[in-house]
Amino acid sequence: MNQQNALAQAIRNKGILIAAHRGVAAGNVPCNTLPAFEAALRQGADILELDIALTGDGNLLVFHPGKEKQHLGKDIHLEELTLEEIAQLRYTNVDRDPTDYGILTLDAFLETFKNRCLINLDHGWEDIRKTIEAVRRHDMEDQILLKAPDKEKYISVIEELAPDMMYMPIIKEKDTVTQMLESRNINYVGAELVFAQDDSYLVSEEYIRSHKEKGRVLWCNPLVYYYKSQLTGGHNDDIAVSGDPEHSWGWLIDKGFDILQTDWTMFLRHFIDNRK
């Protein structure tokens, strides 16, 4: 499928799409590992979201930058280690006990999920050139959704190297990028909107309509990454799984969001399917 239309076609086919935040992690299965991603697809995810980190010798890993102590139990920095050294490391589970799961390379992930689902590469901007090269090396342009902060240094590289690939800026509270993107040679398919209050302009009828009229897709993040930093106002995963999914996920869907990124893939899939 032509990558320009892959995301819109998925929405036409399925309606609201679910993006699994780093797969589905629970029990002994850590996030950003192959079993976490496989579990996400089995639970009904449409998009796999993963994080990209760099090694000291220039390789790309599937790992959230800066989370070594939390996920590996070691006070280390992957960007200071070689790929050979990193191959010896193992994740810890939810109780911080060691597992036998190692850290994926981006190449291994891409080859595993080629032709299986849409993929969002978060933190791919850590080295956007290498990220784009990896996608092209695996011939997966039609599956990949590039996301990056709305900064010129990322946008210019995407325009130069990947004008054909689906691009979605991360817009926080104020949109200062749409007008500029519309004049660039970029496949601007939609936007990730981050807002702290329900009365934010980003969730106003006027603003959402401005994207919809141009065929753009809107992504939001009801997941709770840090409770003091709300990504979707007062509508998040915690509220949904505590008994009020309508106030959380339902509110976001009614606002016009096409993609919800969650840590509760199966629960959200059940909610969407039954809400019809």
Image (spheres, rainbow, N blue to C red):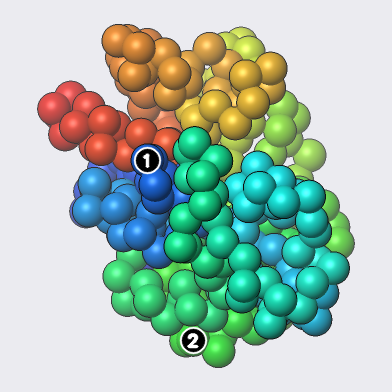
Using the rendered image of the protein, determine whether residue 251 is visible from the camera's viewpoint: no
- What amino acid type should be assigned to the residue bearing mark 1? Gly
> Along the polypeptide, which appears first: circle 1 or circle 2?
1
Q: CA distance from mark 1 to mark 2?
A: 32 Å
At label 2, the amino acid type is His
Q: Position of residue 43 (x, y in %)?
A: 24, 46
For the C terminus, the quadrant is top left
User: Residue at image x 62%, y 19%?
Assistant: 227
Query: Which of the 4 quarters of the picture holds residue 41?
Result: bottom left
- Residue 74, placed above or below residue 210: below
Residue of label 1: 27
What secondary structure is found at the residue carrying circle 1?
A: loop
Q: Which mark is residue 138?
A: 2
Which numbered mark, 1 or 2, is in the foreground of this view? 1
Query: For this rendering, which residue is in front, 220 or 225?
Result: 225
Give the image location of residue 42, x and y in percent: 22, 53
Q: Residue lying at the far front in this picture: please name it.
A: 97
Mark 1 residue crowding within 10 angstroms, few (<14) / some (14–19) / many (20+): few
Is residue 196 visible in this depiction of the protein?
A: yes
Q: Nearer the viewer, residue 233 or 186?
A: 233
Please tell me which residue is depicted at 32% across the width and 76% down the height of the picture.
Answer: 115
Which percent across, then down, holds residue 28? 39, 47
Residue under the image location 22 percent in, 27 percent down:
271
Location of residue 59 by image quarter? bottom right
Q: How busy is the neighbourhood of tag 2: few (under 14 within 10 Å), some, or many (20 plus)?
A: few
Q: Quadrant of the N terminus?
A: bottom left
